[in-house]
Amino acid sequence: MTDLPWMLLVLAAPAISALGTFFAPGRRSVNAIAVAGALAGLLFVLFLVAQVLSVGSVSEPYGLLAVDALSGVLLLLLSLVGLAAVVYSVDYLGWEDSPHPVSLDRLRRYYVFILLFLFTMFLVAEANNLGLLWIALEGTTLVSALLVGFYHTKRAVEASWKYLVLCTVGLVFALFGTILLYLASQASLGPSDASLEWTTLVVAAPRLDPGLVRLALVFLFIGYGTKAGFAPLHTWLPDAHSEAPTPVSALLSAGLLKCAIYALLRVDAITLRMPGFTFGTWLFLGFGVFSVLLAAFFILVQRDLKRLLAYHSVEHMGIISIGIGFGGALGLFGALFHMINHAATKATLFLAGGNLAVSAHTKDLEEVSGALAALPATGTVLLVGGLALAGVPPFSVFTSEFLILTAGFSGSNWIVAVLLLLALAIVFGGLLLHLTRALLGPRPHQGFNTLPKRYLATSLALGLLFPIVVGLGLFLPTPLAALLHQAVRVVNG
């Protein structure tokens, strides 16, 4: 079904507001335009997802854009986290008395970059052509690299260049994979303008050359796996998360990594329709297991709060990959549900961690103690969010991890499920150690500074995400459940 206006409105909201912030005359108008653009993006996404739930999928006549339930899952988490990040930015650096104030010109540039970042990620979700999907992902790299190095410190610039070089090289591999997939499509369909359209490829999948597709998958997993933060391709991720402004770190972890996973899911939907083809399954399981095991041990020794959360991203990308590898309705449902749960939980922790760093003047967890007593609201969010991230019931992350483990133990992948369970136990112990020291220990002599009164408005950003962290573990709304079930069918066929 064609529904071009809603798809274009979703893309237009961040793009037009980026232009508006560039020409806005003052801080108040810059902040207002940025928040309005992010809010409009969320509202348009909700309307578009409602349309998808009603008719199954929407598309435009030229084959470049299409939105189905799988796209809807990504759009929902991107728009929600994007709004929270922009709202948090208003008090974080949007005023002259903010904890991290910048000049009006630099504030304009910041909002232009973060809104264009949202635009490129929305385009990833809406792209039906796999070539356009690759272009959109490259666009996310270019824009987010500017955000990673926004503070212009030596470490920030170094992290930005490392991120840009590694992810660009990775995406060159993904380009080779896309070209090989195009050749496989051409060999099956003949010369056609639709040879890279996902909707065409899923229909033609049984006729694709398995040898070419297998080689394409190797390049695609190296390329998009680098962007997703799979170990051992993850080395850019801790540096980028640590040096970026706090709202950007939240958006990188909660949104950008999911875009790369989404690209691999689109390819997986093609290979699952190829009779007897299991190569993609083993790649998902292999990268997933290595990621969770490596991240688990790195988590034990981290001192920097943002680097700790970055390694948790590596772990959870591995968990999602394992769920996709387990496959079936249960494994895929758990993986897609985990994408939403991890996005909300990790963004919440990054934003609450930003509050903690502003008050304590440090990200070093060994220099922070008694945060729960000093900052009751922020400390409570960090405690609950940390327990949720560790997979403690009844929070949402536990629910999706339980579904993934159930899929593994109920199938023929019990060895992978045992390894995942072992990694989760290590992570739980490490995170509990860090939380106990930082939140529940005695207060240091120098104490904490009170957060600026204006900074209390960031509670609105946390209020957008925190209910998801707690609520989705107890209750799954019917429309979201329907969207996830439809997304599973999109992948599984």
Image (cartoon, rainbow, N blue to C red):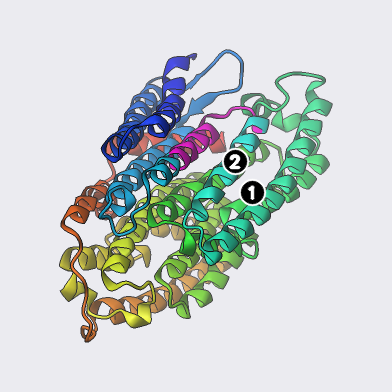
Image position, residue 131 (x, y; %)? 68, 32
Q: Secondary structure at mark 2?
A: helix
- 168 or 394: nearer the viewer: 168
Instruction: Check if mark 2's residue and mark 1's residue have beta carbons within 8 Å.
Output: yes
Which mark is drawn over residue 138?
A: none
Q: Secondary structure at mark 1?
A: helix
Image position, residue 431 (x, y; %)? 38, 74
**Distance (Cα) linking label 2 and label 1:** 9 Å
- 212 or 192: nearer the viewer: 192
Residue 395 lies in quadrant: bottom left
Q: Amino acid under label 1?
A: Tyr
Read off the magenta span. Answer: 112-130
Question: Which residue was labeled with disc 2?
Answer: 137
- 80 or 419: nearer the viewer: 80
Q: Is residue 97 above or below residue 72?
A: below
Question: Which residue was labeled with disc 1?
Answer: 224
Tag 1: Cα neighbours inside 10 Å, few (<14), some, or many (≥20)? many
Tag 2: Cα neighbours inside 10 Å, few (<14), some, or many (≥20)? many
Residue 399 lies in quadrant: bottom left
Left or right: 134 in relation to 361: right
Image position, residue 319 (x, y; %)? 50, 59
Left or right: 153 in relation to 383: right
Residue 358 visible to the viewer: yes
Sequence-wise, which precedes: disc 2 or disc 1? 2
Left or right: 444 in relation to 226: left
